[in-house]
């Protein structure tokens, strides 16, 4: 089969075709496109021109590439991209993000959904583990809401957990357009349960990435994606991170680019805070207040995220104090409060309904959505009946593997 190339196709069509060839990752794509215009490079690859194939610095890939290219119908491929609503920006495009233009690892091709021009001039990357606590989720959501309300664009990798919480907060608040940087093709959301969030980000701001359609979700693509988050952000905040994880890689990439990096301090016994505490020991700034981010951006006015006051009686306050800010089991709470299992279960359920505590499997966690006050400080309304509401967070694991492909 011979590659069919209508003369009227735009340069972006050939960029997409080159990016989709097996064995051509971000680095090799950059080398190829340095050899001339995209249509010319494509013709040279199809024609097996040694001068262009030598740029790959990979003899086995170069030997296989011409046959792979001849099997591609560029017109049909470009029609698929347009049908999916996926655009493409090369480094010479006027809409290519200025923050990436001078980056040492700038993507040669950026696939997009949404409107690049809607992105704010001020951007904050909010990242963290997928194996997060309820405290981390609440803080990320509040931080995302505050930034968006101040007109700042929130940037994340659209992963479950902290990333998703930050964007949910930003989208709900409105204001600064969200920016999502995907590690997979834009028509293949990962994780799948975040498909709706991806669509919301594309509708309200910009969804982007360097993975072509039909490309597998290779593990190296996720840490490669994190360098783009770092490059796009003026400030990066790591909310929660385990000892190892992609968010730590994002922090390192941000520091290498001279960005301000905040880490949220956490309990030393909490696995979800080990990475953040290590960043603090290594010199990152502690996030002591949400408004610290706005100050770092040069914004004088802080934006308050309203928190409802909840009236609690003495017994409820005792249990909240026993939980603290670290996930605890019912057995641990019984030891700390000296309450019987039945009485403790009743109080925990009441506090869950009030939104002060959250249940996640065997764990009980404090939320940050409510300001706790005694019933003497806040007039209590009618006591609502206890019911079986659940506020669970679905934890996962951060994609591993930090070696970028070709």
Image (cartoon, rainbow, N blue to C red):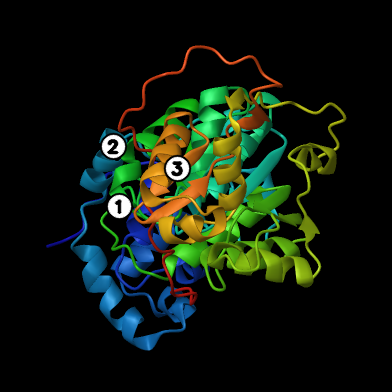
Residue 212 at what x, y percent from top left? Answer: 35, 54
Residue 267 at what x, y percent from top left? Answer: 65, 62
Q: Give me the C-alpha separation between circle 2 and circle 1.
A: 10 Å
Q: Is residue 43 above or below residue 117?
A: below
Is disc 1 placed on a helix, strand or loop? Answer: loop
**Residue at the location (55% across, 60% down)?**
226
Instruction: State the residue in front, 167 or 66.
Output: 167
Q: Is residue 90 visible?
A: no
Mark in the foreground, 1 or 3: 3
* Residue indicated by mark 3: 358
Label 1 Cα crowd, 10 Å radius (few <14 / some 14-19 / many 20+): many
Q: Give me the C-alpha separation between circle 3 and circle 2.
A: 39 Å
Label 2 Cα crowd, 10 Å radius (few <14 / some 14-19 / many 20+): few
Residue 123 at what x, y percent from top left? Answer: 68, 40
* Residue indicated by mark 2: 84
Is disc 3 placed on a helix, strand or loop? Answer: strand
Instruction: State the residue in front, 1 or 198.
Output: 198
Q: Residue furthest bottom?
A: 59
Q: Is residue 65 above or below residue 108?
A: below
Q: Earlier in the sequence, mark 1 or mark 3?
A: 1
């Amino acid at each position: 089969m011979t590659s069919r190339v209508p003369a009227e196709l735009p340069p972006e069509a050939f960029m997409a075709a080159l990016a989709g060839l097996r064995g051509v990752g971000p680095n090799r794509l950059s080398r190829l496109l340095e050899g001339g215009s995209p249509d010319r490079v494509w013709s040279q690859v199809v024609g097996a021109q040694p001068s262009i194939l030598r740029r790959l610095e990979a003899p086995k890939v170069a030997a296989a590439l011409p046959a792979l290219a001849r099997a591609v119908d560029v017109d049909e491929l470009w029609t698929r991209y347009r049908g999916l609503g996926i655009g493409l920006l090369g480094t010479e495009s006027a809409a290519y993000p200025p923050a990436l233009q001078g980056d040492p690892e700038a993507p040669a091709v950026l696939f997009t959904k949404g409107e690049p021009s809607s992105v704010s001039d001020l951007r904050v990357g909010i990242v963290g583990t997928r194996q997060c606590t309820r405290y981390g989720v609440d803080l990320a959501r509040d931080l995302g809401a505050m930034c968006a309300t101040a007109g700042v664009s929130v940037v994340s990798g659209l992963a479950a957990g902290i990333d998703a919480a930050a964007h949910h907060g930003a989208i709900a608040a409105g204001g600064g357009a969200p920016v999502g940087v995907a590690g997979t093709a834009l028509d293949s959301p990962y994780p799948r349960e975040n498909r709706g969030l991806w669509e919301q980000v594309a509708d309200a701001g910009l969804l982007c990435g360097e993975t072509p359609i039909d490309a597998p979700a290779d593990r190296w693509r996720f840490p490669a994606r994190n360098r783009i988050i770092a490059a796009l952000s003026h400030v990066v905040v790591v909310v929660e991170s385990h000892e190892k994880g992609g968010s730590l890689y994002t922090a390192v990439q941000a520091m290498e680019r001279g960005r301000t990096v905040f880490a949220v301090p956490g309990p030393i016994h909490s696995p979800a805070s080990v990475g953040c505490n290590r960043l603090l020991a290594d010199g990152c700034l502690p996030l002591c207040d949400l408004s610290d981010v706005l100050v770092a951006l040069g914004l004088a006015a802080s934006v308050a995220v309203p928190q409802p006051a909840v009236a609690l009686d003495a017994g409820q306050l005792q249990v909240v104090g026993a939980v603290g800010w670290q996930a605890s089991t019912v057995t641990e709470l019984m030891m700390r409060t000296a309450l019987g299992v039945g009485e403790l279960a009743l109080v925990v359920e009441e506090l869950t309904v009030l939104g002060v505590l959250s249940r996640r499997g065997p764990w009980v966690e404090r939320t940050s959505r409510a300001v706790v006050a005694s019933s003497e400080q806040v007039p209590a309304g009618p006591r609502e009946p206890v019911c079986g509401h659940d506020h669970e967070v679905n934890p996962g694991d951060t994609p591993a593997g930090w070696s970028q492909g070709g």
